[in-house]
Image: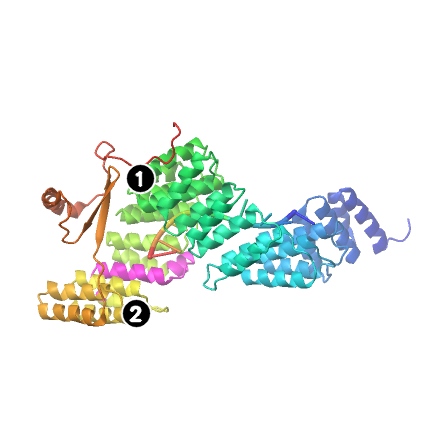
Amino acid sequence: MPERNVFTWNSFVTALAKLGFLDEADSLFRSMPERDQCTWNSMVSGFAQHDRCEEALQYFGLMHKEGFKANEYTFASGLSACSALVDMYSKCGNVSDAQQVFDEMGSRNVVSWNSLITCYEQNGPAVEALKVFHEMLKSNVEPDEVTFASVVSACASLSAIKCSRITEARFIFDNMPIRNVIAETSMIRGYAMAASTKAARLMFTKMKERNIVSWNALISGYTQNGENEEALNLFRLLKRESVCPTHYTFANVLKACADLAELHLGMQAHVHVLKHGFKFQSGEEADIFVGNSLIDMYVKCGCVEDGYLVFRKMMERDCVSWNAMIIGFAQNGYGNEALELFREMLDSGEKPDHITMIGVLSACGHAGFVDEGRHYFSSMTKDFGVAPLRDHYTCMVDLLGRAGFLEEAKSMIEEMPMQPDSVIWGSLLAACKVHRNITLGKYVAEKLLGLEASKSGPYVLLSNMYAELGQWGDAMNVRKLMKKEGVTKQPGCSWIKIQGHVHVFMVKDKRHPRKRQIHSLLDILSAEMRPEQDHAETGSLSSEEMDYSSTLLWDDTM
DNA sequence: GTAGGGTTAG
């Protein structure tokens, strides 16, 4: 045996690694007295070539720690392994390491560039993706359809933050040598984020080839822009064209039903979900998403018990599941149940987030648990690692205001670390009206008018407060001021759909043909409601009592 | 080897 120097060791390690005896290579590596660049290269490339990427990454990290830099031999299989490494770091959200691997690559091909562009597109900042794209063009690497699709996506995500990059996306899209369904779907998403659902629909209509992702992108475009009826119409079209929906589809359809409070359609969607094999008992991510959407749909439609049933049926839950249920309880007047569930959430080991705390604080507010609210608010940073945001302050002002602690609510607004907005002042003004505090009401109304002079809300509330106190002159003055400032109040209106007909009602509306019957029934109802108010309960009418006339979500037999 | 779609609050 010749003298064992690092070169001898290396040849053994390299051979073992190349042949796939990685564990043997690994133990040999560990017993080496010294290592050089070549040793590290053998280990990294060995693991990378045999699809043991985790270990390849670990070795790569260790190599850097020991002061070695990657060279063109570090990834023996060449560019592909290196690009895969960029992609791996990108998928882990580790942008700087992805960039570093990319920087250290001896040569780069279209896939390496694409991987880095995607990295910035997914992890941000998305503008960097465009910069990398420009660098790529400068270095004379020909972009392919994947490059363009990623760049279009980057522009699309930028279209959400006011700089209108949707035009840039469109320009690149129009100049793509080859378009494909992915780039088109990215454009749909971009238009949806820029609130141009019409343009999104046009893109969708013109597509030669569509798949379920394109359908889902447009359906979610509608729900995210509040066009829930359109979302459901598109779902019906999808069914007619026999396209198979996925859990993405159901998440959106259920959200549309939830936002429309369309219980009947939501229940149809639930049946459909079961037909498609979502049983919430596999613990898979898809099941959790659909389960969460179902909880939300039921509680938004006022059926807390059905939402709770879904919640209990789920084998695995995430933070959103708990949040949806806690908020569902809170919004339907079940303050105790919301807080109980929150304690159970903590016991289960699930970490609450800022949305959970909004649910908890609003539960306290609606149930009148002032002390609990104060306690959770003051300890949320320490106990749950969630620092109060403006929304949490708004919940507290609402809670204190409802309970009549108007001065405390006022100081909370004035001492909070962020700028108060019209929502938080508006909440206090409403509380001033309830508790008939005209002095503070005037002060708050002025603050509000400073924020949104053209809105009628503060004027109307203030004038009504004066009127309630019998100060008619002051009430008139506010109304006069409104007129002078050119502020008009849009009359409120409500509507109901009965047997496919929409009936609209406005204040002092005398147009409905059966107005006399309606008003006499209203008198009876309000007389009955008065004694019920103290122990108010939510509930829904049974199906026999309701005359459903909604359109079916799909027409195949169940 | 690289690209597109989802739930909770406000």
Q: Is residue A340 magenta?
A: no
A529 or A495: nearer the viewer: A495
Which is nearer the N-term, disc 2 or disc 1?
1
Residue type at mark 2 is Leu
Task: State the image coordinates of residue A301 (x, y, percent, origin top left).
Answer: 30, 43
Name of the residue lying farthest toward the top = A557
Q: Is residue A473 above or below residue A85?
A: below
- Crowd rating for badge 1 (residues with CA inside 10 Å; few <14, some 14–19, many 20+): some
Identify the main secondary structure in magenta: helix
Please say if the residues under marks 2 and 1 sit with CB atoms less than 8 Å apart: no
Q: Chain of mark 1?
A: A
Viewed as shown, does residue A276 lie left or right of A342?
A: right
Q: Chain of mark 2?
A: A
Q: Which residues are magenta?
A: A380-406
Residue lying at 65% horizontally and 56% vertically, measured from the top left: A113
Task: State the image coordinates of residue A359 (x, y, percent, origin top left).
Answer: 34, 52
Q: CA distance from mark 2 to mark 1?
A: 38 Å
Task: State the image coordinates of residue A64 (x, y, percent, origin top left).
Answer: 69, 60
Residue type at mark 1 is Leu
Viewed as shown, does residue A473 lie left or right of A369?
A: left
The residue under label 2 is: A451
- Crowd rating for badge 2 (residues with CA inside 10 Å; few <14, some 14–19, many 20+): some
Q: Secondary structure at mark 1?
A: helix
Q: Is residue A394 magenta?
A: yes
Residue lying at 43% horizontally and 34% vertically, measured from the top left: A240
Viewed as shown, does residue A434 lie left or right of A23?
A: left
Within the image, what quadrant is residue A279 found in?
Answer: top left
The residue under label 1 is: A263
